[in-house]
Image (cartoon, rainbow, N blue to C red):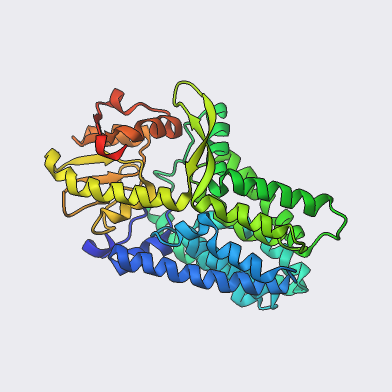
Amino acid sequence: MLIGEGRYSPSRMPGCPAMETLAGILATPFASNLAVAIFGLFAVFAFRALARQLNIKNEKLAVAVFAFLPLFWVNSASTMDYVPAICLAISAFAAIGYRRPIIAGMLFGIAIGFRPATLVLLPGLFAYGHIAGAGKRNFLMLPGIFGFIALFFLPILSIRGWSGFVPVGAAMGFERRMLFAAYRALGAFGTLGWIAIIIGLTTALFGKREKSSAFRLLLLTAPLFIVVWLILPHEAGYWIAILPFVILAIFGTGGKRQYLYAILLLLPAFIDIGFRAKLPDKYEFGPKIAAGMVISDYRVRRDIVRLREELPALELPDNSIVITGRSAALFEINDNFTAHNELCGHDIWISKRTKVRFVDNLPGYCADSLLSIGTNIYILQSAVPAVNLVHRWRPVDFGAVVLSEPDFR
C-alpha cells in the first residue's frame, strides 16, 4: 500500500511503523533483508560498547556469542523488526552509559517505532542511567522517547483508533498459553542454550564472586519482559529483547567454564535436543535429536521457494488467502509489502506473481470478515496445529480447504 498508493497502513495494530515504512521504501526482499543485516552489525558494536561499560571480564567471548547466537543470527537475515529494535535499544543503553541522555532518548524512541514491545525495557534503561551516574539528567531522555512515540503512533491512532487491536494469543486459555509460552521460550535459545543460561545465571546468583553490574542490569530488564511474555506469548524472536542482557550477565564474572556456556549457546545453530509434541488435542512429549535453528530456517526458506513455484499449478482463485505457518520466510515469496487486511488489522501480504495472498497465521475473527466478502481460504496441512494452538479455531470449520503438501514434509 505504501508503494502502490503512497499511504501507510499498519499490518497489525498499533503497527511497527518504522519497520514497515522502511520495508515499503526499500521495496524488495533483498534490500530489506540487507538493511536488517546492517542493523545486526551495528547491534554487535553497540553490544561491545555496553560490555565495556559494564567491565565484562570475558568481553570478546561475550561479543562473539551475541553475534553468532542462533536466535540473533537467523533474525538478522530476515525482514523482521526484532533486530533493528534491539540494535537501537542497546545503543540507547550505551548512550546513557556515556551520559548522553538526549541521544539515548531519541534512539530508544525510534526503537519503539520499530517495535512497540521495546517499551518493556524502559524501566531498565532509566535504572541503568542511574547506575551510570546520569542522575537527574535521566529525565532528558523523555522528550526523545515520547516525541518519537507520538510521531510514529499518534497519526495511526487518530485515524484507526484501536480498531483491529487484538493481542496475539488472546484466544488461548491459560493452559494453552503456558504451554505455548514454554514451547516458544524453549525455541528461543534451544534446550542446550537454556542449560547454559540456567547454570550460568545460577552460578552468577549464588556463586562466591561479587554480583556483576551486568547481572543487576538483567534483574532490571527481565522481570517485566517475562510477565508480558506469559500474558502474550507468541514468536521466539520476542526473546531478542532481553538477549543482550542475558549474555552480559552470564559472561560478567569471567571463569573458564564460560567457554562451555559459549559452546552450549552456539551449538543449537546446528543441532539440539528437541521435543516431540502431538497437538492440538493431546499433549504428548518426548525428547529427540533435532536440527538446529539455522538448518531449520534454511529448510523453511527452501520449502517457501518450492511453494512459490508449485502454487500456480493448483490454479487457486485470485481472491484467495493461503495460511502457511511459515513466519518470516513469507518475505521470500512476496514481491512487495503493500497490502494489508483493513478488516481486522492482521498481516497479509500480496504476491503479484500468483495474485494470491499469503499469511503466516490467521485469527478466527479475521476469517469471519474475509469469508463475508467472498475470500477463499486455504491452509497448508502443516499449519493446522499452529492455528489451532495459537488462535484456537479450526480453519476447516470455517470452510478453509487444507492443501496437502507431500513435498514439504
Q: Is residue 345 left or right of residue 190?
A: left
Residue 194 percent coordinates (x, y):
63, 46
Question: Who is closer to the viewer here, 155 or 338?
Answer: 338
Residue 198 percent coordinates (x, y):
70, 46
Quadrant assignment, res 24: bottom left
Residue drawn at point x = 24 percent, y = 45 percent: 307
Residue drawn at point x = 48 percent, y = 21 percent: 282
Number of dots carrying numbers = 0
Residue 93 percent coordinates (x, y):
64, 69
Quadrant assignment, res 364: top left
Q: Is residue 5 left or right of residue 114?
A: left
Quadrant assignment, res 217: bottom right
Q: In which quadrant of the rendered image does the N terminus lie?
A: bottom left
Single out the residue that lies furthest toward the right: 208
Q: In which quadrant of the rendered image does the C terminus lie?
A: top left
Decide: is 195 above or below 84. above
Residue drawn at point x = 34 percent, y = 42 percent: 344
Residue 143 visible to an observer of this rendering: no
Residue 321 percent coordinates (x, y):
24, 40
Question: Who is closer to the viewer here, 288 or 393?
Answer: 288
Decide: is 57 above or below 258. below
Question: Who is closer to the viewer here, 261 or 253?
Answer: 261
Q: Is residue 197 left or right of residue 2?
A: right
Residue 310 visible to an observer of this rendering: yes
